[in-house]
Image (cartoon, rainbow, N blue to C red):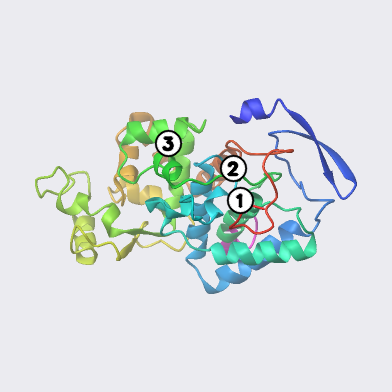
């Protein structure tokens, strides 16, 4: 069900005798204000505590939120463990390198102590993504609307078919985002998340060693950059080595990704693809400006965070994020 049709349903949310009218499909500011006033503070405190000692976490949480929203909407389905009868999203190749689940569990445990069965795991993921990135700035970098509920279904096959691949060309990327009612503009803006974090060699080494199947290098790759990558990824089959996605700036959330992109230093084929379309290239040029990037990123994250959400009486509030109730 898409966000628009969800928004038609009007539901009444009842929490501890507090009744609040909420448009189904409509997330809102301070959703937990009366039912769990400390909710957002708890998420931020625990997230910041962990980011302070692990600078890789912001990239991890941003990716977790992204991968969650692209499969069945932002419903926390990426957190569910596989069972005897079902391989969950976690088992899919794009999600096998996701980490940070332990931090989500710690946040959930604290929230369950404070206000049981109130705060969804889906909202925790959305808030942790924002808060982890915001730690660098010591202030919230974008607004997160809350009120998501948790899904009960998680399938490995759906993760594979919905999460955009690092091998995608521009047409496939644009379609993948359009399938989630996200625009070309959102695609270019959200790709800027690659300003932090690392990529595994096997997701781009074909560009170094065998681009068209003839042992060649991708001609759209900056030759000096390609040499640096080859020094780190020595074979096509290296699945363990990781490389900074934004050369020289992979721990700092900034607009440097777009500067690097214009210097033909996009790590993945899906990064380089943003320069193969005229409209997309123009957006890349605009986002080199850091203030523009921060503003636009916040707006696109808000749109992505609303993809196919479950609200009202749909879904559930999981007691533990890795299993359905």
Eye-nearest disc, 3 or 1: 1
The stretch drawn in magenta includes residue 58: no
Q: Residue furthest bottom?
A: 53
Instruction: Say what secondary structure mark 3 lies in.
Output: helix
**Residue 193 image offset from top left, x and y in percent:** 46, 50
- Disc 2 from disc 1: Cα separation: 7 Å
- Start-end of magenta stretch: 134-141
**Residue 235 image offset from top left, x and y in percent:** 18, 61
Q: Which residue is label 2 attached to? A: 305
- Residue 44 visible within the image: no
**Residue 282 image offset from top left, x and y in percent:** 39, 34
In which quadrant of the rendered view does residue 250 lie?
A: bottom left
Q: Which residue is label 1 attached to? A: 126
Badge number at residue 283: 3
2 or 1: tag closer to the N-terminus? 1
- Disc 3 from disc 2: Cα separation: 21 Å
The answer to the question of whether label 3 and label 2 lie on touching residues, with beta carbons closer than 8 A, is no
């Amino acid at each position: 069900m898409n966000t628009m049709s969800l928004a038609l349903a009007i539901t009444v949310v009842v929490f501890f005798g507090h009744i609040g009218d909420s448009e189904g499909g409509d997330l809102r500011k301070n959703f937990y204000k009366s039912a769990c006033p400390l909710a957002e503070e708890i998420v931020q405190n625990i997230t910041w505590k962990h980011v302070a000692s692990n600078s890789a976490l912001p990239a991890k949480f941003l990716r977790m939120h992204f991968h969650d929203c692209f499969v069945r909407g932002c419903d926390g389905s990426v957190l569910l463990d596989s069972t005897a009868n079902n391989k969950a999203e976690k088992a899919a190749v794009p999600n096998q390198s996701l980490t940070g689940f332990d931090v989500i569990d710690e946040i959930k445990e604290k929230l369950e102590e404070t206000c049981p069965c109130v705060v969804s795991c889906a909202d925790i993921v959305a808030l942790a993504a924002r808060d982890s990135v915001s730690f660098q700035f010591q202030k919230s970098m974008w607004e997160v609307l809350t009120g998501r509920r948790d899904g009960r279904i998680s399938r490995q096959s759906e993760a594979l078919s919905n999460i955009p691949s690092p091998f995608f060309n521009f047409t496939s990327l644009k379609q993948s985002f359009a399938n989630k009612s996200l625009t070309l503009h959102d695609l270019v803006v959200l790709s800027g998340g690659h300003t932090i974090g690392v990529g595994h060699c096997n997701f781009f080494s074909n560009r170094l060693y065998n681009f068209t199947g003839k042992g060649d290098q991708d001609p759209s790759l900056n030759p000096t950059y390609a040499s640096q990558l080859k020094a780190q990824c020595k074979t096509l089959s290296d699945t363990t080595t990781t490389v900074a996605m934004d050369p020289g700036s992979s721990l700092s959330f900034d607009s440097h990704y777009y500067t690097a992109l214009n210097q033909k230093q996009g790590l993945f084929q899906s990064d380089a693809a943003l320069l193969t379309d005229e409209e997309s290239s123009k957006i890349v040029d605009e986002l080199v400006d850091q203030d523009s990037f921060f503003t636009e990123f916040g707006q696109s994250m808000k749109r992505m965070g609303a993809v196919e959400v479950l609200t009202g009486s749909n879904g559930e509030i999981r007691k533990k994020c890795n299993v359905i109730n």
